[in-house]
Structures are given as structure tokens and as C-alpha cells.
Amino acid sequence: MPAFPSDHPPLLAARGLAFARNEQPVFGPLDFAVDAGEALLVQGDNGAGKTTLLRVLAGLLRADSGDVSIDGRPATIGLRARAISYMGHLPALKADLTALENLDFLCGLHGRRRGQLPANAMAIVGLAGYEDILVRQLSAGQRKRLSLARLWLAPSPLWLLDEPYANLDLDGINLVNRMVQAHLRDGGAALLTTHGAYAAPPVRTRMLALERPS
Amino acid sequence: MIWPATKALMARDLRLLWRRRGDAMQPALLALLVVVLFALALGGEARALSKVASAVLWLAVLLAGLLSLDSLFRGDADDGSLEQWMLAPVPLGWLVLVRTFMHWSTTALPLLVAAPFLGELLHLPRNELPVLLASLGLGTPLLSLLGAVVAALTVGMRRSGILVALLALPLYVPVLVFGAGSVAAAAQGLDSTGALLLLAAGLVLALVLAPLAAAAAIRIALS
């Protein structure tokens, strides 16, 4: 099945990926691939295993069977760390630090894309002027935007976004779409989970529908 | 890659410490409380106090460390920071080591500096002070590293205060025995080098093994 017409191996590919918790299958076995410049929309009801799939791909959970490859190479911990940025439900922000201090720390931890500065990223996500505000004083939506700024600064080509639209207003949803679009134009790829109620980014999109195993 | 991450983590921990300086004082206050209450309970009699001074100081430092152990990874687990540590291009074990070092330098190091004054409060014989400081200097990092493994093991649980203490106790006992023992030996005019060297050997071992064990424990606890 020549699913990939180009000679390039897909940025992310999974073969026979399955995960079970306490002998109960959560998802899989799944086969899918994402090329550079593409988004994969992971859809499914609550409890269908969307978050678990993303955590497995990020390397936070170990798959029971199947394998994941990045750029045609088996995904080791080191390779994943360089290629993947993961944005989960937990914001990984310290409430007692200011917005900019949080970004500085996360940039130190993950590295920073060449030519990108934390202050610029804050302006892009619409948080200009909030640099010195403690994160505990930000709203849930503003924290989400700060997480998006962190994502924007990360040098990784592959974004794993777990419910990126949650807590965001209409303007924020557009922001996510614009960011994903720009990221894909730069040769990146993104996986987004959604339960289907939101508008998808206007990019080349593949779909992966997860169903709760019966 | 490692150096920027290390610097960022150190800066973050110092900033957090400053923002929550009230909480950060708690371990030191507990140690002070133990020492003062002991001095009062023994009636302030110099001879009785000087006999137990080194043991009381060691206990106070150990209890202060135990009290602050739960905060080592708890906050970072709750807000998802540990997840990002696991996904960073820096080895998790190294981040754990840096975090433990910062924790040690903010909880145990102030006590180490205060030890001569607390010793004065307990009529600690002056000639025992160098050995006490040496044993604390080798022993407290060892306690922090052992504690880091225990804290990492329990990081997946909601409330684990007493469990942490129970798990850490058997690991802490040998450190306490050799730490307080080295001072006791010096007090009797015996050579305390043996006990100190054993502490140093334990510290070297823990420096290498404890971060790896704690990192593995964190990966299991958060999966």
C-alpha cells in the first residue's frame, strides 16, 4: 500500500500500535503516518483513548505492542525528546512565577527555536503586557495561551496537542489554527486531539477516528 | 543542552524559594524548635547537654530534612512539570540530581551554617564541632539523595506524608548511626575517620545511583 507517494519517510509513523491498561485494551492496534506539512486530527468520544495515544507517542507511556518511527528511524527516548513537543492537560506552569519566567525556564529545558524570543512569542499568542504577571493571576485561557507560546518557541518539528482548543475563546481557537498552519508551512507536523466540536485548522489534514473498544 | 537546562532549573528553584520564603523557612524553624525544646527539657544543665548535643543536632537536621521531603517533587508532579522534564532532551536523572541539590542547599545548607550557633545553645564541646560539621556536610547530601528516591516512589500518590517518613526511615538509620557515631567517637578521643569515610563512600555511591533510581521511579509513578 503506497500511502506515501514521496521518497521521504513520514515524520511520524506508527505500526500496529496498541496499549492496554490492566489487560483492558485502551486503543489499537493502530496504523497511521503523518508527513511533514500535515496535521493528523485524532477524533473520538471521551474515554476513547485520545490522550493515552498522545502520551504513548510522546513516550510518557510504553506501548504494549507495535512500534513508532520518527523520520524513518525507531523512536528512542533521545530522538523523541528532540523531535516532539507535547502539550497535555497539565500546563506545566509554576503559579508563583511570572509568565515570562515560566517561558524562560521551559526554553532552558527544551531548547529554543533559532531567532525566536520569549517576549515575541508572548506577543504572538496575545499576551503582550502580561510578561510580569504571576501565572496564578492568569485565567485558564491565558495559561493555555502561555503553553502555546512555549510550544511556539520549542525547536521540535512534531507537535502533539491534547485538546488544544479547550478553554480558549473564538480568537484563541483561530490562534491555534494559525499557529498550526505556520508550523506546518515550516515543514513541521502536528497531531491534534479533539472530540469533534471545533473547527479544524485549514491545512492538509488526515483523520484518525478512535472508538472505545467494546 | 545540559548546561542551559541546569541553569534554568536552578534559577527557577531560587525564584520559587524567594516567592514562598515563608514556607521555605519551615524546616529550619523545626530544627531550631527541636534544639531549643531539648535544651529547655534538660534544664539547661551544661554537663547533661554537652553529652547529647551532637546527637540532638543530628536528629534535628534529619527531622527537618524529613519534613521537607514531600515537597521535593510534589509540586512539579501536580502541575505537570515532571511530564515536561521527562520529555526534555536532558536526562531525567540529571534534572533530578539538580533539583535534589537545590533542595539540599535550601533546606540543609542553612542548618549546616547555623550548626555552630545551635551547638553553642546545647553546650557542644568546641573540639567536637569540626567533626560534627564534617559529618553533617557528608551526611545531609546523602540523606537528601536517599530521600529523593523515596519521594520519587511516592510522587504518584495524593497524600503521602507519613508514608514518605516510614519508607525513608530505614534508609536514614545507617546515616544517622555513622553520622552521630563519628562525633561520639571523637568525644571519647577515638579516631572518627572511619565513620566519616564510610559516609563519604555512601555519598559517592548515592550521587551516582540515587538520581537514576529516582528517575526510574518517577517514570513508573507517572505512567
Image (cartoon, coloured by chain):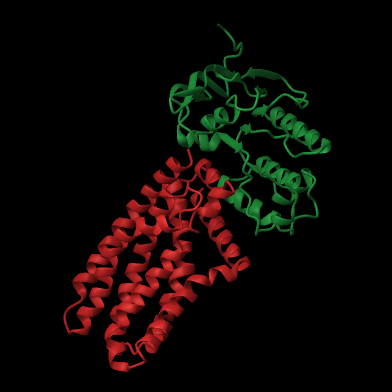
Chain colours: A green, B red
Residue at the image point whose x is 69% and y is 58% from the top: A98
Question: Can I make out residue B146 in this image?
Answer: no
Image coords of residue B135 (percent x, y): 30, 73
Above or below B18: residue B86: above
Percent from the top left, x then y, of residue A18? 48, 21
**How many labels, in total?**
0
Q: Position of residue B15 (x, y in %)?
A: 60, 64
Examine the image and state in which quarter residue A161 appears: top right
Instruction: Say if A81 sits above or below A127 in the image.
Output: above
Left or right of B81 in this view: A115 = right
Say whether residue A25 is visible: yes
* x 47%, y 24%: residue: A24
Q: Is residue A92 left or right of residue A170?
A: left
Residue B125, x across and y down, in percent: 29, 89
- Residue A191 sits in which quadrant? top right
Placement of A64 over or under B109, stated as above or below = above
A86 left or right of A24?
right
Furthest-right residue in this view: A171
Classify A151 as above or below B106: above
* Residue that lies at the very extreme toward the top in this rendered image: A1
* Residue in the picture at 44% in, 28% down: A22
Q: Residue furthest left?
A: B190
